[in-house]
Image (spheres, rainbow, N blue to C red):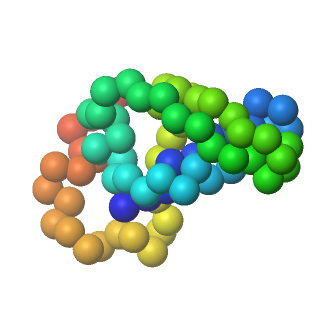
Amino acid sequence: MGMVMIKCPETGSVIPTGIEMDRERFRSSAVFFSRTYCRMCAATHEWFAKEAWVYESALANGKSGGRESFGGGAA
Ligand SMILES: [Zn+2]
């Protein structure tokens, strides 16, 4: 499980969206649109999934077998 992150268009800072999703699911999900409140700007930014990415903390590994995670020649 990871946290969906976006980059603030005003400050360039990375901000967490508060949405938790694993990377595979995020990639395979249809393009979606969301809004996240940015504390830096005290404003709400609208963003598309293509502008976002999933940050998985190092603590989150080793839980599952990882059989179909991440291998398979990403290029
Ligand atoms: Zn912002």
Q: Is residue 14 above or below residue 60?
A: above
* Residue 14 x, y percent position in the rendering: 71, 47
Taking depth in this image into account, of 38 and 69 the one nearest to the observer is 38
Q: In this image, 28 relative to 40: left or right?
A: left
- Residue appearing at x 59%, y 29% in the figure: 47
Compared with 18, 70 (above or below) is above
Give percent across and percent down for residue 36.
Answer: 63, 43
Q: Nearer the viewer, residue 57 or 15?
A: 15
Where, quadrant-wise, is the N terminus in this rendering? bottom left
Label count reads 0
Q: Is residue 14 left or right of residue 66?
A: right
Describe residue 9's horizontal placement relative to residue 30 as left or right.
right
Q: Is residue 40 left or right of residue 66?
A: right
Tell me if residue 35 can be seen.
yes
Quadrant, the C terminus: top left
Taking the spot 45% from the left edge, 74% from the top edge, the residue there is 59
**Residue 14 visible in rendering:** no
Rendering quarter of residue 64: bottom left
Task: Look at 36% across and 47% down and name the residue there.
Answer: 23
Image position, residue 25 (x, y; %) = 28, 44
- Image coordinates of residue 72 in percent, x first then y, are 21, 38
